[in-house]
Amino acid sequence: MRCEWIDEEWTEDLSWCPSQCYRRIRCNGRIYTLYLRWRWEDPWQFSIAEGDMLSQRGLFVIDFRRGQAGRLIGFDEEGKPIVEELKWRFITGDLFAELGLFFRDEEYRQAERKAEEIFFEWIKKRCLGSSDDAVY
């Protein structure tokens, strides 16, 4: 298995709520985004998305009746939203919660390091049978 970071460091959007941190990695030709989220109260949440979450920034629209989500790119003449299909999708839930891990707001650096560790364990399990010659 060959993995290479796309981003040298985490992209941190900490001035808004929710606070969010992203780091992208390419493993065996696929792009994954490690995503940390903190909203109003502890703890941080950690999920993995398949695809590049940072390539589509902006407002997202979720239609629960149709089970669809997309990025808002404008409105038509009738005021209805024009939505672009997402090029990424979450493939895990909150892995910190699943593993019983708790990081407070100010512990985001520790959360980033732990998210990386969890990701590499997760990708090894997902790619069973691949060699351990990963490049990190």
Image (cartoon, rainbow, N blue to C red):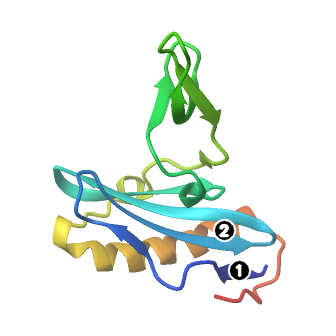
Instruction: Read off the residue under disc 2.
Output: 123
Q: In this rendering, would 31 be left or right of 35?
A: right
Residue appearing at x 59%, y 75% in the figure? 120
Q: In this rendering, would 15 be left or right of 120?
A: left
Q: What element carries label 1?
A: strand
Instruction: From the top left corner, tell me how far across and down residue 92 is, in percent.
Output: 55, 50
Q: In this rendering, would 61 be left or right of 14?
A: right
Q: Which mark is residue 107?
A: none
**Residue in the foreground of this view, choosing between 35 and 14:** 14
Depth-wise, is mark 2 or mark 1 nearer the camera?
1
Q: Of the residues shown, which amino acid type is indicated by label 2?
A: Ile
Q: Of the residues shown, which amino acid type is indicated by label 1?
A: Cys
Residue appearing at x 57%, y 25% in the figure? 82
Instruction: Read off the residue under disc 1.
Output: 3
Tag 2 and tag 1, C-beta contact below 8 Å: yes
Instruction: From the top left corner, tell me how far across and down residue 55 is, in percent.
Output: 60, 57
**Residue in the foreground of this view, choosing between 36 and 127:** 36
